[in-house]
Amino acid sequence: MKDKIKISDIAQECGVSISTVSLVLNNKPGVSQETRSRVLQAAQELEYPIKSGVETEGNHLLTTIGMVVKTDPDIPPAANPFYSKVIMGIEDSCRREGINLLLATLPVDENNYPLEVPQLLNSDIVDGLLLVGTCLQEPLLSSSGKETPPIVLVDGYSDDEIYDTVISDNFRAAYQAVEFLIGRGHCHIGLLGSEANCYPSLRDRRNGYLRAMKENKLDEIYISNFNINRSKGYQEALDLLKENPQITALFCVNDDVGSTAIRAIQSQGMRVPEDISVIGFDDTYLAVNTHPELTTMHVDTVAMGRAAVHLLSLRLANPESARMTLTIHPQLVERESVAFHPSKFLTTVVPRD
C-alpha cells in the first residue's frame, strides 16, 4: 500500500520549510507567489489532498509586500515630511486588504541612487516590491542573478523605464505655481533649488518653471542651482536676492526650501509676502508651521501610497500587460506667503496738455 503523503514530503520536494508548506496549504499569507505555486504543484504531483478554496496557479493573490524606502543620512523615512505620508498610504491600503507588509530602508547618494542592495530585494517571501523615492538602476536587482518579483516605483524613476510607477505631475504643477505668481503681478520670479541633472521630479519642476516663464514672455530667468540633499537653500536664497534685487517672488522646489527661504528673507529685514512672495511644493506639515503660512502645491502623498498597492496588485494579476504610470495631479493651496505685486496693475496716467 502506498505510504500516506505528509507535508514534510512536500517540503523536502520543494526545498522549503514545513511551516511554509503549512501556510500554503491553509491559504495563509506570508509566502511569495512563486513559492506558493511550487508548493501547490508539488502537492498535486504527490497527490496530496488540497483543501477547497486554496489558491491555485493562475489565482494571483497579493499576500505579502516588501516596501523599500530611501533613507537620507540625516533623516529616517518615517520623519521625512513627504515620504512619511506615502508610507502611511501604503500601510493603510495593506491593512484594509489584509496584506502583510515588510519594510526595508535603502541608503542613497545625494542624487537618490542606491548605495547598497537591501536583502529584501532578493527575498522569496514577498509577492511584490514597492520602491519609494529612488532612481533605480538595473544592476541593483540583477546582481544576485535571481529573478525578482514585480516592482512598482513610488515617486521613483528607472534609467531603463521598465517598471510601473506612481508619480505626481511635477511639470504641470510647477507651471501652475509660476502662473499663479504671474497672475498676482510678479514678472521677476526666481527658482530656488534643483540642478540641470537633478532628481527627475525636481527636474520636471524646474522645466515647468522655465516653460511658464517662456510662454508668458518673461525673458529674465533667475535660478539658484543647488542640490537639496546638501543644502536647504538659506544662503542660496540670500545670494540670489542680493544678485537680483528686482526679484519679487520665489518658486521653491519643495516646502523645506520654501520655509528656509522665508527665514532667510526675514533675516535681512524684508517681509513675506509684502517684499518677497514665496510659493512651495508638496504641502507637507512644514507649510502650515511656517510664518507666514506657505502657499504651496498640494501632493496627495497618501493617495500615492494607496495607488501603488493597487498598481502592484494589477501587475501581479497581469504580468504581461504594458508598463503603467499612474499620475497624481497636485492642487494649489493658497495661504499667506504670496501677495499681489502692484506694478503690473498700476495704470499709467497721461497728463493733459
Image (tube, rainbow, N blue to C red):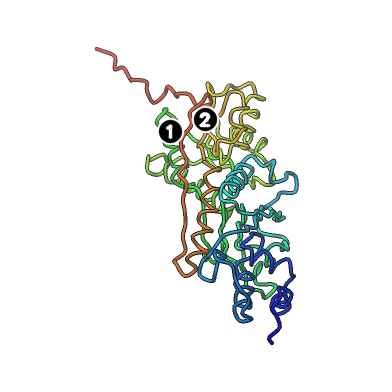
Res 247 seen here: no
Name which residue type carries label 2.
Thr
**Residues at badges 2 and 1 in contact (C-beta under 8 Å)?**
yes
Q: Earlier in the sequence, mark 2 or mark 1?
A: 1
* Outermost residue toward the bottom in this view: 1
Q: Which residue is mark 1?
A: 180
Q: Quadrant of residue 214?
A: top left
Question: At numbered mark 2, what does the secondary structure look like: helix, strand or loop?
Answer: loop
Q: Percent x, y for residue 17?
A: 74, 70
Q: Percent x, y for residue 11?
A: 72, 74
Q: Is residue 349 above or below residue 252?
A: above
Mark drawn on residue 345: none
Mark 1 crowd level (few <14, some 14–19, many ≥20, 10 Å Cα)? some
Instruction: Locate the C terminus and report the quarter of the image it occupies.
Output: top left
Instruction: Locate the N terminus and report the quarter of the image it occupies.
Output: bottom right
Q: Which residue is mark 2?
A: 295
* Outermost residue toward the top in this view: 353
Q: Is residue 351 left or right of residue 42?
A: left
Q: CA distance from mark 2 to mark 1?
A: 10 Å
Q: Residue at x 71, y 83 (%)?
A: 3
Q: Percent x, y for residue 34?
A: 61, 70
Name which residue type carries label 1.
Phe
Q: Residue at x 56, y 50 (%)?
A: 97
Q: Percent x, y for residue 116?
A: 73, 62
Res 50 seen here: yes
Question: At numbered mark 1, what does the secondary structure look like: helix, strand or loop?
Answer: helix
Q: Nearer the viewer, residue 216 or 55?
A: 55
Front label number (2 vs 1): 2
